[in-house]
Amino acid sequence: MHFQPLLDDIAATLRPELGRGGQVASYIPALARVPAAQFGIALRTCDGEEAQAGDSGTPFSIQSISKLFSLALAMRELGDTLWERIGREPSGNPFNSLVQLEAEHGIPRNPFINAGALAVTDRLVSRCDAKARMLALLSSLCGEPVGFDAEVAASEAATGFRNVALANFMKSFGRIDNDVGPVLDAYFHDCAITMSCVQLARAAGFLCRDGAHPYTGEPVLNERQTRRVNALMLTCGTYDAAGEFAFRIGLPCKSGVGGGIVAVVPDRLTLCVWSPALEPSGNSLLGMKALELFAAKTGLSIF
Ligand SMILES: NC(=O)CC[C@H](N)C(=O)O
């Protein structure tokens, strides 16, 4: 299949909609001032073929897409013991909700809501320099140095009252081992990582290759772990819009409020779309449309 003309076609189809509809994330100034009228798409196949269109090389704040990579690190470090403190069910609630945690004894529904990612980060902080490990993993996976945006990280910390509450609430149930400070610091920095669509399409490449590193072929995760990450992306990767994503797109996806969405076609390719304006659940509005067009035009879906 020739992907370059397809991506050009998707970018051209969506161009008239740029900057119309949806809301750019406004909870911190650094995200609020990102111009809405931007769209990028990039993909990389299992064989290393690449295609890209639009603003595919523009760096953006990856936000919750980082939860994918912190989960991979924790699965590698902890194996199945990770699941003692984190569930695998969709929450059906907003990504930063506290509401289920009390009845469920401080065990988050899944690793892709904020509570779950904080629990994952706590386990990593116990074992390694979590911030450095994250940058090392991402830089290795995309073949280029990846960094934090210091302004975004500082704003996340200054305004992250709900995340502070989530961490403390889980700590009160004995589900967080470390002081909440270093856990939150690592989490806020993960949210503040900056990458482009091209870099993310490459970095997620292990997810379409049974866990093999996109460049070296070494196992990032084993085959079983990789299947599980893809399953969690499908059921929980796009918050309370996961059902809508499965219905309209039918691919494992992970989104972030910076407007990026990573999608996986197992055994074929990984792709990343980006457009800053979001629908009410916090997923990129045009990113969703782009993925829907991609699935419709290629017939690629896990169903
Ligand atoms: N969904 C997201 O991308 C959320 C990330 C955001 N920084 C938060 O913690 O609330």
Image: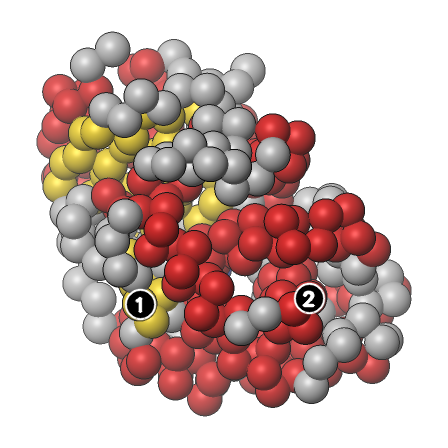
Left or right side of 123 for 131: left
The secondary element bearing badge 1 is classed as strand
- Label 2 CB-ligand 1 distance < 8 A: no
Q: Read off the residue under disc 2.
A: 123
Q: What residue type is labelled 2?
A: Arg
Left or right side of 193 for 106: right
Left or right side of 70 for 194: left
Above or below, comparing residue 267 to residue 257 in the picture: above
Viewer-side residue, 278 vs 178: 178
x and y percentages locating residue 287 in the rendered image: 32, 42
The residue that appears at 39% across and 63% down in the rendered structure is 135
x and y percentages locating residue 103 in the rendered image: 87, 64
The residue that appears at 22% across and 58% down in the rendered structure is 59
Residue 264: quadrant of the picture: top left
Q: How many labels does the image show?
A: 2
Local crowd size for mark 1, using a 10 Å CA cut-off: few (<14), some (14–19), many (≥20):
some
Q: What residue type is labelled 1?
A: Gly
Above or below, comparing residue 2 to residue 46 in the picture: above
Viewer-side residue, 194 vs 224: 224
Above or below, comparing residue 253 to residue 100 in the picture: above
The residue that appears at 47% across and 71% down in the rendered structure is 131
In the rendered image, is residue 138 in sight? yes
What is the spatial separation of the Cα atoms under label 2 and label 1, in whole angstroms?
A: 22 Å
x and y percentages locating residue 121 in the rendered image: 61, 67
Q: Earlier in the sequence, mark 2 or mark 1?
A: 2
Residue 117: quadrant of the picture: bottom right
Residue 61: quadrant of the picture: bottom left
Viewer-side residue, 1 vs 161: 1
x and y percentages locating residue 153 in the rendered image: 39, 79
Q: Read off the residue under disc 1.
A: 147
